[in-house]
Amino acid sequence: RVLERSSVVLQIVDARNPPFYLSEDLRTYAMDELGKPMLMVVNKSDYLTERQRKVWSEYFTNKGIDHLFFSAYDEQKKIDKAAAAAKRGDLLDDKEERQFVSDDESDTEEGPNHSNGLPGDEKHTEIEEESSNKPTSEKLIGITHPLTREELLNALAIFATNHGCQPEKKYDNRIQYGMVGFPNVGKSSVINVLIGSSKNIHGVARVGVAAQPGKTKHFQTLLLPDRDDMMLCDCPGLVFPSFVSSTADMIAAGVYPIAQMRDHWPVVSLICKRIPREVLNAHYGIHIPEPSLHELREKGLDGKELPPPTAEELLGTYCIARSMLAPSSGVPDYQRASRVVVKDYSEGKLLYCHSPPPSDGGTLVIQDDEYQRETLKTAIRNTNNAKKLQKLLILEDSSAPSKSEEVKEVDDDNFDDFDDILGGMDDEGANSGPSEKRGKAHKSIKKWGKKGRKLRNKDPYGCQSDPDTVLNAASNGGSGVIMNAGKYSSSGYTRANYAGAKAATLFEGRANNNRPVKAKR
């Protein structure tokens, strides 16, 4: 229905993974069979840096796809801020106006090229010169910076004029632009920005938006308040058939509703493979346990770098840190924690941007590791948490291998020799004799007090004792229940000497010096 009514088709895609949201079949049907031009609007372009946008632009140009880079989130913030200021009636205070006028006068007197000799002025001048030297084509499609609302409207009008689209009388001499695409790519958000709608402005048409997919459920058309030659058409998002997309990919991409997620392990495992371990630790303020060298070798890894965390490690650590436990059993609530992680990923809080596939004739080549480093810069720029920002900056500055130094190397020949691991114990056990040295004493042993130190069992669980020695000692000595210290009472006092129940000594009463008196047998 949208393709039939619209003169120009706008396919909205997410900048984090444009090929996933781009439907080649829909593009072929609209352009070849219907004969209508299609323009791809890369929404959420604020997630990309200028270098990343340039690489994607070259990829789309080689594919012959007309595209624009736009950020509905940034433009909506500008509209909401202006609307809130207009509602308060303080668009420009007197103090700010006087400061603005004085700055204009000083610029006029000193000249536009005047510099105060400060380093910031030279840097600002260099930035202006660099932006002015950018090609015009990069500014028109939003490579230097995502297009603003006015720039996008002008680009849409130019695109329609270049492809021979004429206004229709049944629409009051307007050209209708249809918005199509996957769910949760921002079609309704782009429409709200183009019509200038804000939550602080009443009496203006506004399209309902939500974080979950499937908010728009019917066909609707809207008019622009400041453009008499345009009309926008919104439609519900449709998931186009694909052979390479699994359920986990669709949930992570925000196409499938998180509330209807049944199996959370595949999608969380996918997120753990994409988001680095350090970013997860910094974002949630946790420390995911790191496997030992023995565990890595059991999995067939060389131990030079840590593998990505598993879904159970991430969710278990998060549940323990947030006390997110099941009320009945007390086990970690993995289902609830998975919804939080998947929601953060789909909303861009855990940012991951896919690098463009290799194309023929491309001059800009960027490796995936370098591309993800650019994504890390965007995550640092968007964060507001000071602790998280500090951890991300440390991660960005670190150029050495991530975890090669943290994994302790153990000799292959003596890897199973527990004498080396336990600190020099002999083969007969740690308790072979009082005169022999145990090696390096543990901190807990050093902290023992003097009272009862000799009677305390150094190996209560038998982990460091020889089984034969224990059995022979038990057969030679007295057997029975070892009784702990008892209580003073009127009838007597029972005290154990740690030699068995037969050797328990009975005491009756107390003497004048308040000491127990031994009973006669």
Image (cartoon, helix red, strand yellow):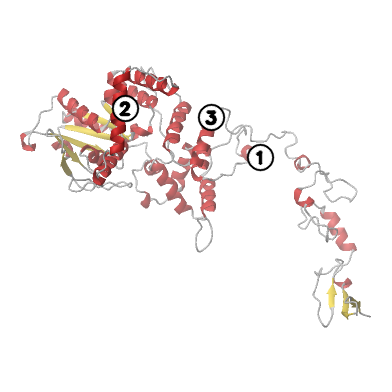
Tell me if I can see residue 168 in this picture: yes
Q: Nearer the viewer, residue 252 or 403?
A: 403
Horizontal and vertical percent position of residue 42: 30, 32
Q: Is residue 323 left or right of residue 68?
A: right
Q: Which residue is mark 2?
A: 103
Badge 3: residue crowd in 10 Å (few <14, some 14–19, many ≥20) = few
Label 3 element class: helix
Q: Closer to the observer: label 1 or label 3?
A: 3
Q: Which residue is mark 1?
A: 294
Q: Closer to the observer: label 2 or label 1?
A: 2
Horizontal and vertical percent position of residue 94: 28, 38
Horizontal and vertical percent position of residue 141: 28, 25
Lower sequence index among marks 2 and 1: 2
Q: Nearer the viewer, residue 50 or 198?
A: 198
Q: Residue at x 85, y 72 (%)?
A: 495
Q: Residue at x 24, y 43 (%)?
A: 86
